[in-house]
Image (spheres, rainbow, N blue to C red):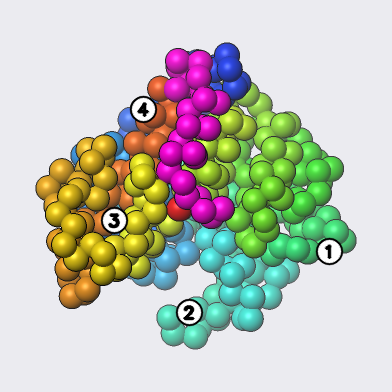
Amino acid sequence: MSKPISFEITHVCKQSGARTGILHTPHGDVETPMFMPVGTQATVKFISPEELYRMNAGIVLANTYHLWLRPGEDIVAKAGGVQKFMNYKGPMLTDSGGFQVFSLADTRKIKEEGVTFRNTLNGDMLFLSPEKSIQIQNKIGADIMMSFDECIPYPAARDYVEKSVQRTLRWAARGKAANQRPEEQALFGIVQGGDHEDLRDYCAEKLVEMDFDGYSIGGTSVGEDKETMYRMVRWSQEKLPLDKPRYLMGVGAVNDLLESVSMNIDMCDCVLPTRIARHGTLMTKQGRINIRKAMYAEDFTPLDPTCDCYCCQNYTKAYLHHLFRTDEGFGTRLMSIHNLRFLLKLMEDARSAIREDRFNDFKKETLETMNFDSRGF
């Protein structure tokens, strides 16, 4: 049986051990390591597909849970799949819907069969299982799908984590068996295990035995401190095969991205760049800018003079300040474009540094120059 995706490592940095690669998908090749914009409702907020092309975005995410509720997976399928539905000609990835379901702690009930929870739109009771998640994702039609897993909170008692890992593994096997388009859509297994090295090792080993097309690392960025998060990522990736892509879910801060690259993570995603843009926070080579501040009312310089994005090439901080203070949607669009392009360029520069065998130097210089706080933005 032919594989829907393939992955090749193109260079390993002599200084750091970080790697570059190419992920071959049905909708095109993308270089790794990469940052992936999040298009929850089959759209990246305030940004058109054409703008995504221009900023050199590769894989774009869509959210299974939200597209299941609206407009429904059958409508997306009738449109010809999510790429045709939203007119994005590049590769796409869908999450399993699990994170959204498990964030509804007040209404959900977890059983071996799956999860029952309340529809956040109309209050109806819904049921999502590993098989149902894959069925929905098959109809949505993205190049890469995620296994349905349990994203546990942090901290959690070891006894619960052990039971959750076993359930996640059983669900992964059930979802893999349910995939009706294995030659067209790749499926990733998700490593869980909380802050327990042996459980993450065990989960990774069992997923590798199932032979997924790639592997995700879940259960991080859920309230733990940075060192704990990095420790969980390091443990999770140690038992994963070198020749398959590794995806760290829900990470978009600069320090987290660079630390992830140093641990051979190939793919990351996060809503952070567009979310903080909507609140007037911008990431630049000089550090964080809060465009709401009065100091920018008469600042007629670009947001970031080193940035090649449409926003920085055409508009000033004073204009962005004005747009934000008057609640104009154009300002949100411009700032979202900038923050996304900033992270995409960061990963382009990281790939160049790896190929030049100087990634450790690049990481150190970047973090010192940008002068972000501990959050990484």
Question: Contact (CB < 8 A) between labels 3 and 1?
Answer: no
Disc 1 marks which residue? 157
Residue 349 as seen in the image, left or right of residue 111: left
Q: Which residue is mark 3?
A: 336
The boundaries of the magenta stretch are: 353-376
Asked if residue 33 is among those painted magenta in the image, a careful observer would answer: no
Q: Secondary structure at mark 4?
A: strand
- Residue 64 placed where, x, y %? 46, 59
**Residue located 46% across and 46% down the image:** 371
Q: What crowding class fits label 1: few (fewer than 14 Cα within 10 Å), some (14-19), or many (20 or more)?
A: few
Identify the residue shown where x is 33% and y is 50%.
339
Tell me how far mark 1 sits from mark 2, CA to CA: 28 Å
Comparing 214 with 233, the one in front is: 233
Q: CA distance from mark 2 to mark 3?
A: 27 Å
Tag 2 residue? 120
* Disc 2 secondary structure class: loop
Q: Position of residue 44 (x, y in %)?
A: 31, 56
Local secondary structure at mark 1: loop
Asked if one can make out residue 210 in the rendered structure from this viewpoint, the answer is: no
Rounded to the nearest angstrom, the CA distance separating label 3 from label 1 is 39 Å
* For marks 2 and 4 on the same chain, the one whose residue lies earlier in the sequence: 4
Viewer-proximal residue among 169 and 289? 289
Circle nearer the N terminus (3, 1): 1
| Image location (x, y in percent) of residue 263 | 62, 32
